[in-house]
Amino acid sequence: MENDTIAAISTPVGEGAISIVRISGEQAIPVTAELFHDKDLLEVNTHTIHYGKIIDPVENEVAEEVMVTVMRAPKTFTREDVVEINCHGGMVAVNRVLEIVLEKGVRIAEPGEFTKRAFLHGRIDLSQAEAVMDVIRSKTDKAMSVALKQMDGRLSELIGRLRQELLETVAHVEVNIDYPEYDDVEEMSNTMMQEKTKEVHGELEHLLQVAKQGKILREGLATAIIGRPNVGKSSLMNTLVQENKAIVTEVPGTTRDIIEEYVNVRGVPLRLVDTAGIRETEDIVEKIGVDRSREVLQDADLVLFVLNHNEPLTVEDEKLFEAVQGLDYIVIVNKTDLEPKLDLDKVNKLADGKPVITTSLIREEGIDQLETAIAKTFFAGDVDTGDMTYVSNVRHIQLLKQAKQALEDAMGSLEMDMPLDIVQIDVTRTWEFLGEIIGDTASDSLIDQLFSQFCLGK
């Protein structure tokens, strides 16, 4: 299967300026050359693009007017010969070209198979391959920056360096064990082993400390907007999204269901969830919405709790303060353009140190202060994607935690003066866990599972 020539449509489904059929493998250029008229593609230079027509060999007629890019191995994404056929945008044209290519014995690619071949041929490691999808799915410029640095190998280099340090330590121990008669071999003492494990442990701790920020950049903050009906929740969502996604009326209980939207706030991607107003109600449909809102609240990374500046604090408001205890939340006192009836001193007391922002969404006042508060809550006001190496992938985070635990087991054994050949078992486990991040020690089944999550044609 790995030696097959594969093809797939690499552009999104739908109408557009162009659609691309990507082909990779030994037969990529010969097959395309058979179908392409106006120039002999077998003779053209690598990394050149050529205008011509694809001929349907069955109907003996022009199937499509195209531009064909020829790229010869090994300087390609897959390190195989690659051809990209640029067709007119639209599903009919590109599907016809793909069908003609497949009729020549080329196999349809599996999801992520082009990237998988790049990994198997050593062009990229597993963490870089996963970063390809992170680039595609990035919601903000900063998330894109983190993904690009991982795809460029920044995380791989760090993991590779830590693994090399552990490997040299283990090798030194084994030399001392196997050849104790050699006087010129420096004895690996417990002190030296402790220094090395402590050094690597510190780097793993740092990676895990910023992992939460990296995960936020990659996946976005699940952000629930809560409050009683008609306090301005939907208006807040529309203001942040800058579109009229939610219905805004003076009638309490208008929002009956959950509305979701992504928004970029100071480089932090928020997955905004506008919930139904939480209150006691006899309306069956509204009650379902309220119940769903309470469920969303439990899964939220951040809660935007909206109050009405024009109304006194109610028992329902106080119950909501109780509901958000233990969560990261920001209190938003809305409608400051109206007569003040809310006791702000009591609100600040109930907030217990959490940010309290006053806004008039109808006048677009207080939005900057709110965005600053959101950024400070998770990134101390700024997101550093310059020199920082972020770990954002859940799989990577879990493996780092396992590596850190194995190293702590080794450090505990050292403190108990256990023999070094016992200690090195846990150090070797750490080395293996780190290897799974970049794919050096990953199983075939794991690799297949990871690449199956990629989009077709990537």
Image (cartoon, helix red, strand yellow):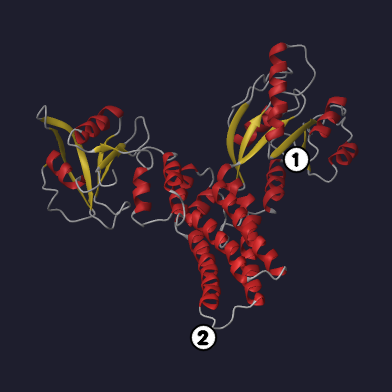
The single residue placed furthest to the bottom in the displayed view is: 183
Residue 2 shown left or right of residue 267 in the figure = left
Q: Is residue 87 above or below residue 289?
A: below
Dividing the picture into quadrants, the one containing residue 10 is: top left
55 to the left or right of 247: left
Q: What amino acid is labelled 2 in the image? A: Tyr
Tag 1: Cα neighbours inside 10 Å, few (<14), some, or many (≥20)?
A: many
Residue 77 percent location from the top left of the image: 33, 52
Q: Quadrant of residue 34?
A: top left
- The nearer-to-camera label among 2 and 1 is 2
Residue at horizontal 27 percent and vertical 27 percent from the top: 92
Asked if disc 2 and disc 1 are in contact, CB closer than 8 Å, the reply is no
Name the one closer to the observer, 425 or 346: 425
Q: Amino acid at mark 1?
A: Tyr
Q: Nearer the viewer, residue 63 or 338?
A: 63
Q: Residue at x 38, y 42 (%)?
A: 112
Q: Which numbered disc, 2 or 1, marks the residue that appears first in the sequence?
A: 2
Q: Position of residue 215 (x, y in %)?
A: 59, 47
Residue 153, percent across and down? 46, 59
Q: Tell me if I can see residue 439 in this picture.
A: yes
Secondary structure beneath dot 2 equals loop
The image's mark for residue 449 is none
Residue 304 percent coordinates (x, y): 72, 36
Q: Quadrant of the N terminus?
A: top left
Q: Which residue is rendered at x = 74% and y = 11% of the image? A: 283
- Residue bearing the label numbered 2: 182
Residue on which disc 1 sits: 329
Report the number of discs.
2
